[in-house]
Amino acid sequence: MKHAREGQSVPVGWVLDANGQPTTDPNVGLQGSMVPSGNYKGVGIALMVELLAAAMAGATLGTAASPFSGTAGGPPKTGQFFIAIDPQATSGGLFQDRLADLTASIRDQTNARVPGDGRRSCREKAALDGVAVNTAVLEKVRALV
């Protein structure tokens, strides 16, 4: 939606048109679907989330839901599913140490990073250099004040 709003194309491999064909046009992609992340394993995770958040919650399945990007079809009637786990209880108090070991072993690999590393790096850079903002968005924000 952001790319469509800003008139930018999306990278190849992000979205499919309504016929399942790859496209770089975000508006065409909004009429189709996003490409599943992680190939067959990503599809498995997506299926699990769909079962938990839609089927078990009695919500509309994604295959029948109306889009978030407009008013067609009415509200999407989404569902939610939450799981609460106490990692200290399930790990015998070793969670923090195991987490630190795991993230260190990932970061020790060439060109590998842990989710959140990129965001932290961007925040550190923004704190030093400021944040680049699209001029059209900035004008809209300034018009609100």
Image (cartoon, grey):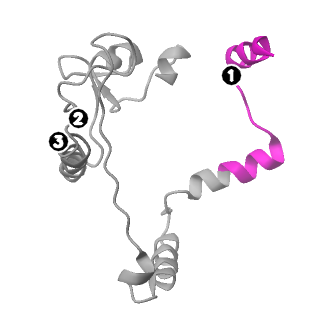
* Magenta stretch encompasses residue 124: yes
Which residue type carries mark 2? Answer: Ala
Question: Is 144 positioned to the left or the right of 41 in the image?
Answer: right
Residue 14 placement: quadrant: top left
The kind of secondary structure the magenta stretch mainly shows is helix
Label located before the other in sequence (2 or 1): 2
The residue shown at (55%, 56%) is 116
Mark 2 surroundings: few (<14), some (14-19) or many (≥20) residues within 10 A:
some
Residue stretch rendered in magenta on the structure: 122-145
Which residue type carries mark 3? Answer: Ala
Q: Tell me the CA gap for discs 2 and 1.
A: 37 Å
Give coordinates of residue 19: x percent, y percent.
17, 17
Which residue type carries mark 1? Answer: Asn
State whether residue 51 is above or below residue 13: below
Q: Check disc 3 and report the residue beneath it.
A: 55
Question: Is 145 positioned to the left or the right of 47 in the image?
Answer: right
Q: Check disc 2 and report the residue beneath it.
A: 59
Give coordinates of residue 82: x percent, y percent.
35, 54
State whether residue 111 is above or below residue 56: below
Label located before the other in sequence (1 or 3): 3
Does dot 3 land on a helix, a strand or a loop? helix
Question: Is 85 positioned to the left or the right of 64 in the image?
Answer: right
The residue shown at (67%, 48%) is 122
Mark 1 surroundings: few (<14), some (14-19) or many (≥20) residues within 10 A:
few
Q: Check disc 1 and report the residue beneath it.
A: 134
Q: Tell me the CA gap for discs 2 and 3.
A: 6 Å
The residue shown at (50%, 21%) is 3
Q: Which is in the foreground here, disc 1 or disc 3? A: 3
Give coordinates of residue 88: x percent, y percent.
45, 81
